[in-house]
Image (tube, rainbow, N blue to C red):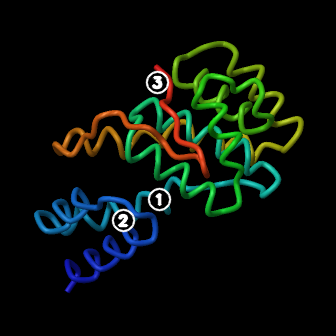
Amino acid sequence: MIRWFLNRQARAFGRRYDYDTAYMHDVINAAPKAGMRMAAFPYATGFRGPPEAGEVVAGAMLASTLDGDCGPCAQLVVDMVTQAGGDPGKLRLCAEGMDAEAGDVGMGFRFAKAAISGDPLADDLRAEIEARFGKEAVIAAAFAAATGRWYPVFKRGLGHGAACTRLRFGDRSVNVLTVS
């Protein structure tokens, strides 16, 4: 019964975002307990903080995901943020290396890159995020920076990694710069 339910949820997710969920089905069918944990991961790590910090968190999610992948997982982040009302143009600027022009999305993008690489710039960006949006926004951006690359790494570990692709940002498709 749990396999049926989890597979059903994975199919619905795939349809909603036009996303290949084959790796999810592999996990669910081989180890339902692992499938349950995989399904719970977004609930455990998906703290988004105050709504006014949404752009910062979106930028951090994109940077972290691009750190692990420049293909389907990154496209999924773009699609999810866009569907939630985010600006695909600002995400595109970040992906093309013009994050300084992307406002709060760019600040979150730079924060995640700095946090991932251990760059001291993360301290300045953290202070700016906290001053403008509060401590909850910092926590949300840190969650996004730490966990965005989980799925790409997990998928590669299962043999479902994908080559880099062009990403769609609204009506434009672009090659992205890798974050690492």
On the rendered image, what quadrant is the N terminus found in?
A: bottom left
From this view, report whether residue 102 is shown above or below residue 160: above
Task: Tell me which corner region of the image, top left, top right, bottom left or bottom right, holds residue 85.
Answer: bottom right
Q: Are marks 2 and 1 in contact (CB under 8 Å)?
A: yes
Give the numbered dot on residue 42: 1
Looking at the rendered structure, the secondary structure element under dot 1 is helix
Disc on the earlier residue, 3 or 1: 1
Q: Amino acid at mark 3?
A: Thr
Q: 138 or 61, which is in the foreground?
A: 61
Q: Please tell me in which quadrant of the rendered image residue 125 appears.
A: top right
Which element carries disc 3, helix, strand or loop?
loop
Work out whether residue 140 or residue 161 is closer to the camera in this orientation and state it.
161
Distance (Cα) linking label 2 and label 3: 27 Å
Q: Position of residue 34 (x, y in %)?
A: 23, 61
Residue 11 spot, x, y in % from top left: 31, 73
Residue 75: x %, y % from top left: 47, 47
Please tell me how many numbered marks the rendered image carries. Answer: 3
- Badge 2 is on which residue? 39
Give how far across and how far down residue 89 sits, in percent: 69, 42
Element marked by disc 2: helix
Residue lying furthest left: 30
Kindly check if marks 3 and 1 are in contact, taking CB atoms under 8 A apart as contact. no
Q: Are marks 2 and 3 in contact (CB under 8 Å)?
A: no
Query: Which amino acid, by three-letter code, is at mark 1?
Result: Pro
Front-lying residue, 152 or 37: 152
What amino acid is found at the position of numbered circle 2 in the picture?
A: Ala
Q: Name the residue beneath numbered marker 3.
A: 178
Q: CA distance from mark 2 to mark 1?
A: 7 Å
Residue 50 lies, with reference to residue 156, above or below; the image says: below
Q: Report the side of 161 relative to 149 (left or right).
A: left
